[in-house]
Image: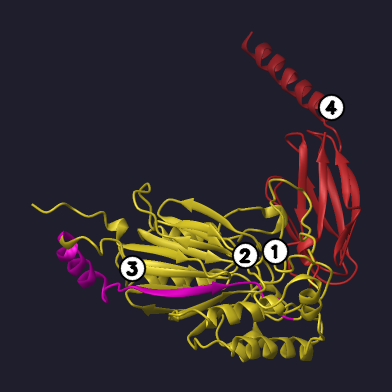
């Protein structure tokens, strides 16, 4: 009797796990290029609750990549791809800035993430 | 029994209209109260030197070398500011430049030229006690190396008439931060002072999250404020945002100065960080910061401040002719 109960529980847990895996949305992958003094694309739209992976490259110098609420805080060095994954928890416009000084136009270098 | 005096009134900073910059007058808050003499002496013993009245000026963001539509007159506002300060009947004792003395350039020789040009204009000041901190346009590109060579260290502290002044560098690292080394220096520097010591911090970027999307913040500003929270009388004077702004945190006033090159808009009213357009009819419009006055009866705070909007004006120039004079070839 007790063994049967444990068996049923194991089956239920496994079923739930499989169900979760089946329903988990894969991360959407988007390429972003940083180049003094802009990100391309300059704006992108994502879904609330859906994971997003940005593959960011630099065409010239080291740039920063920072957005506090989305938990984005990294550096984009030239010559390699930097991956940043986040999941927007709410709708809104989130401005990712270059926070690694890269020249006179640095203060206006940003990427807008629109979460809907 | 004598009435106790709020120690947070120990220092009051008052501003007086100059037409440009900000002139701060520092005086003991109870100067007119005879009953406060004993408390003043006691606090002076605790703090070291007693606070005695004096005044100083803050100018910011001169961006020498900048050329563009937001201000085709180059250094004219800066030069006019120097004239105005020199014309003050009573000269202030100190003048502070809170960063972005120069606009950056890719060429090292050009950067040096701009710094020397800044020094040439600032050298016209009658007031010789000049202090500065760098902005990111002066120092971020090379870690402050050239700035140190021309102007001296990017951070330091000194005492003046009972006030402890801290010049804090939050720009010479690639990211907008003070950094662990300078945080440790700040902690050590302030460790010898009592909580009642009046502290005035000069820095370039705001030490709080004013508008991170426009890079109007300091990544480790919270760490700085944690160190400063041990003190009751703290004022932070900064630049960077090219517009007036006042912000209070417990025990601390944060006051931004206007620029002497162009103004930024109110970030609460626009998403675009674009300079306000140049107005040929009023070429110095929005330049020159607010002026700070002391206020009595304000809520308990480290320093009691009141502000006036003051704009730099052209005394000698007017109309189209005046504007054309401003556009005379620059010697830069």
**Could you say where residue A14 lies in the image, as x and y percent from the top left?**
76, 24
Q: Marks 1 and 2, how far apart in space? A: 6 Å
Q: Nearer the viewer, residue B262 or B189?
A: B262
- Whether marks 4 and 2 lie on the same chain: no
Q: Is residue A3 left or right of residue B296?
A: right
Quarter residue B217 falls in: bottom right
Q: Is residue B55 left or right of residue A105?
A: left
Determine which residue is flagged by label 2.
B311
Q: Nearer the viewer, residue A96 or B238?
A: B238
Please, what secondary structure does the residue beneath circle 4 have? helix
Q: Are marks 1 and 3 in contact (CB under 8 Å)?
A: no
Quarter residue B79 falls in: bottom right
Look at chain A in the picture and name its colour: red
Q: Does any portion of residue B279 appear in the rendered image?
A: yes
Which portion, as a residue range, is magenta?
A: B35-64
Quadrant (top left, top right, bottom left, bottom right) of the C terminus of chain B? bottom right
Q: Are marks 4 and 1 in contact (CB under 8 Å)?
A: no
Q: Are marks 1 and 2 in contact (CB under 8 Å)?
A: yes
Determine which residue is flagged by label 4.
A23
Name the residue at 56% across, 80% down. B154
**Could you say where residue B305 lies in the image, as x and y percent from the top left?**
43, 57
Q: Earlier in the sequence, mark 1 or mark 3?
A: 3
Give the chain of mark 3: B
Q: Nearer the viewer, residue A61 or B96?
A: B96
Q: Does any portion of residue A87 appear in the rendered image?
A: no
Determine which residue is flagged by label 3.
B27
Determine which residue is flagged by label 1.
B285
Q: Give the crowd class for mark 3: few <14, some 14-19, many >=20 residues within 10 Å.
A: many
């Amino acid at each position: 009797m007790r063994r049967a109960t444990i068996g049923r529980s194991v089956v239920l847990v496994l079923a739930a796990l499989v169900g979760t895996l089946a329903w988990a949305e894969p991360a959407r992958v988007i390429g972003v290029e940083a180049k003094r003094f802009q990100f391309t694309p300059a704006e992108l739209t994502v879904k609330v609750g859906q994971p997003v992976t940005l593959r960011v490259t630099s065409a010239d110098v080291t740039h920063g990549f920072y957005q506090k609420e989305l938990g984005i805080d990294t550096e984009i060095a030239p010559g390699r791809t930097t991956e940043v994954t986040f999941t927007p928890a709410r709708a809104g416009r989130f401005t990712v800035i270059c926070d690694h000084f890269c020249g006179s136009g640095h203060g206006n270098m940003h990427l807008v993430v629109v979460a809907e | 029994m004598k009435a106790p005096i709020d120690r947070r009134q120990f220092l009051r900073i008052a501003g007086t209209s100059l037409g440009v910059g900000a002139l701060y007058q520092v005086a003991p808050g109870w100067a007119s109260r005879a009953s406060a003499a004993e408390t003043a002496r006691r606090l002076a013993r605790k703090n070291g030197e007693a606070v005695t009245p004096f005044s100083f000026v803050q100018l910011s963001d001169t961006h020498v070398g900048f050329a563009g539509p937001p201000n085709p007159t180059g250094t004219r506002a800066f030069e006019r500011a120097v004239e105005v300060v020199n014309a003050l009947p009573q000269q202030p004792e100190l003048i502070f430049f809170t960063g972005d003395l120069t606009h950056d350039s890719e060429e090292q020789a050009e950067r040096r030229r701009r710094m020397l040009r800044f020094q040439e204009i600032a050298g016209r000041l009658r007031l010789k006690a000049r202090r500065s901190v760098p902005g990111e346009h002066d120092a971020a590109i090379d870690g402050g190396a050239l700035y140190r060579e021309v102007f001296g260290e990017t951070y330091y502290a000194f005492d003046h008439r009972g006030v402890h002044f801290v010049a804090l560098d939050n720009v010479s690292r690639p990211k907008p931060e003070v950094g662990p080394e300078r945080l440790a220096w700040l902690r050590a520097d302030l460790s010898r002072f009592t909580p009642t010591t009046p502290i005035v911090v000069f820095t370039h970027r705001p030490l709080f999250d004013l508008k991170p999307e426009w890079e109007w913040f300091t990544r480790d500003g919270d760490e700085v404020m944690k160190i400063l929270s041990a003190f009751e009388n703290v004022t932070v004077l900064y630049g960077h945002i090219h517009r007036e702004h006042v912000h209070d945190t417990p025990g601390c006033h944060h006051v931004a100065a206007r620029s002497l090159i162009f103004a930024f808009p109110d970030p609460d009213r626009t998403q675009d960080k674009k300079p306000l357009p140049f107005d040929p009819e009023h070429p110095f419009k929005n330049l020159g910061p607010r002026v700070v006055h002391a206020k009595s009866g304000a809520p308990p705070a480290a320093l009691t401040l009141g502000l006036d909007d003051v704009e730099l004006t052209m005394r000698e120039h007017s109309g189209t002719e005046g504007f054309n004079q401003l556009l005379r070839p620059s010697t830069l």
